[in-house]
């Protein structure tokens, strides 16, 4: 199999993973928030550096949420009955999303609050 065909197959799998993520409630919520942030970026023009930071934050949080969902699916498959270890694994994965989202929210405030103040106050 040549590398172009492997790349195409890999891209197909990645897009399928994204599509599956789009069926998850929390991922959809994060996509809506990301969309609002992008709209805010156009309303309060961002510098190239600010756009890069915002996009890295969005990609990071969405990626963490996909990993969290994958971990939950695997844990549920391996341990269908209640298990404290399974609970801990799922809680830790959710904690990773929380840390990423919290840090991204702080970064968003640092970037957008001064622009909001400058525009409206």
Image (cartoon, grey):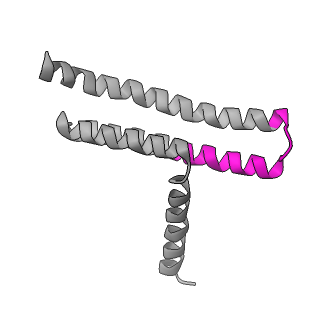
Q: Which residues are magenta?
A: 63-85
Q: Residue at x 42, y 45 (%)?
A: 31
Question: 119 left or right of 36?
Answer: left
The N terminus, quarter of image: bottom right
**Quadrant hosting residue 59:** top left
Q: Reply yes or no: does residue 69 show up in magenta.
A: yes
Q: Residue at x 59, y 34 (%)?
A: 96
Q: Residue at x 54, y 64 (%)?
A: 16
Q: Nearer the viewer, residue 73 or 111?
A: 73
Q: Is 80 placed above or below 49 here?
A: below
Q: Nearer the viewer, residue 81 or 96?
A: 81
Farthest top residue?
121
Q: Is 40 placed above or below 74 here?
A: above
Q: Residue at x 22, y 41 (%)?
A: 48
Residue 23: % across, % down: 54, 53
**Quadrant hosting residue 45:** top left
Residue 82 in view (yes/no): yes
Residue 101: % across, % down: 48, 32
Residue 15: % across, % down: 49, 64
Q: Nearer the viewer, residue 15 or 35?
A: 35
Residue 49: % across, % down: 26, 38
Magenta span: helix, strand or loop, mainly?
A: helix
Number of marks present in the image shown: 0
Q: Is 94 placed above or below 79 here?
A: above
The C terminus, quarter of image: top left
Question: 59 left or right of 42?
Answer: right
Q: Nearer the viewer, residue 33 or 74?
A: 33
Residue 49 in view (yes/no): no
Farthest bottom residue?
1
């Amino acid at each position: 199999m040549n590398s172009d065909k492997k790349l195409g197959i890999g891209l197909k799998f990645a897009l399928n993973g994204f599509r599956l993520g789009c069926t998850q409630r929390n991922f959809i919520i994060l996509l809506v928030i990301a969309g609002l942030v992008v709209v805010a970026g156009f309303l309060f023009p961002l510098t190239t550096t600010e756009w890069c930071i915002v996009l890295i934050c969005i990609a990071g949080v969405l990626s963490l949420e996909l990993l969290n969902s994958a971990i939950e699916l695997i844990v549920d498959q391996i341990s269908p009955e209640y298990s404290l270890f399974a609970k801990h694994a799922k809680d830790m994965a959710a904690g990773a999303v929380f840390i990423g989202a919290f840090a991204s929210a702080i970064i968003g405030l640092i970037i957008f609050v001064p622009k909001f103040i400058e525009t409206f106050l």
